[in-house]
Image (cartoon, helix red, strand yellow):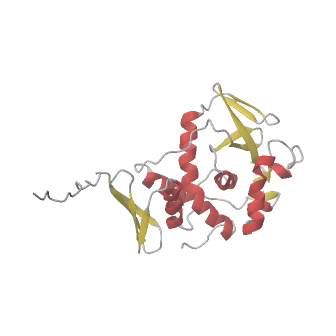
Amino acid sequence: MLPDMSGFSPAFERLGAALSAVVLQQQETLAEFLPREDWSADLTARSYTSGGVTVRVALLGSYATRERTWLWGWANPQFGEDHPAVVPTLPIRTLGERLGIPEFTTPEVDLSWYEGPAGHGGELVAMAAGGVLGGGGYIGAGYDGGSAYLHVDDPQAPPAGWDPVPVARLLANATSLFGREPRLTLARLLSQHRVPYRQRGDVTEVYLPGGGTARAVFDNRGRFARWEADLTPTPVPAPQTAPLVH
């Protein structure tokens, strides 16, 4: 486990580590499905339209650029917890209460301390929140003074499929944002796609669907070092048959 060097709570960091690679992969899938062109949203109707594609959404919260704070939709006086776009997100707060994650239960989260690789700390809150809800991903919808974050809650948005090729990139990007437990980041991604694996010291052995193997190697500080994949299917031996007896 790497030391916690951020202003986020350890519980939030661990959850973010578990979900980050899964969320990043889903975001790439959403980007291929939903054009990012001129957009419009009707939160009462829970709809977001971009490039002629309309999806059902829920309101996670918003990030204010000047104040550098995250405001949950349920805490925003313009909406509140009974608003149609907010109700689907309330399980995030419930989970925060159960697991002791203050970022999920504090109405307005101060992120002025954040100086990490993401554009701002609100992006990481949106990532973790979207990961909790699953679904099609999340959308950052900019407005004068900040960005609203919408969760895509629509079955027409395709789920990300398994692909071993981008795993190294996904894991590197995910651990740059949530670096607390890289092994957990990989394990959650593999579990998401029901890919079997086994941990052996600093190496995670992965048994790829359709044959082939991969190894994720971590250094002595627990950081992700490299991904080695052999995509050659393992030949299946022919079934043995009993000799004919005359």
Q: Quadrant of residue 95?
A: bottom right
- Which residue, as the protein is rendered here, is positioned at the far left? 246
Q: Quadrant of residue 124?
A: bottom right
Q: Quadrant of the N terminus?
A: bottom right
Residue 185: % across, % down: 53, 61
Residue 174: % across, % down: 54, 56
- Which residue, as the protein is rendered here, is positioned at the far top? 52
Between 24 and 200, the residue placed more toward the observer is: 200
Q: Is residue 72 above or below residue 179?
A: above
Residue 106: % across, % down: 81, 61
- Which residue, as the protein is rendered here, is positioned at the far front? 246
Q: Residue at x 75, y 67 (%)?
A: 98
- Which residue, as the protein is rendered here, is positioned at the far right? 77
Q: Quadrant of the C terminus?
A: bottom left
Q: Is residue 212 left or right of residue 245?
A: right
Between 174 and 146, the residue placed more toward the observer is: 174
Q: Is residue 147 visible?
A: no
Q: Residue at x 61, y 58 (%)?
A: 116
How many numbered marks does the figure carry? 0
Q: Quadrant of residue 149?
A: top right
Q: Is residue 134 left or right of residue 65?
A: left
Q: Residue at x 45, y 57 (%)?
A: 195
Q: Is residue 205 above or below residue 137?
A: below
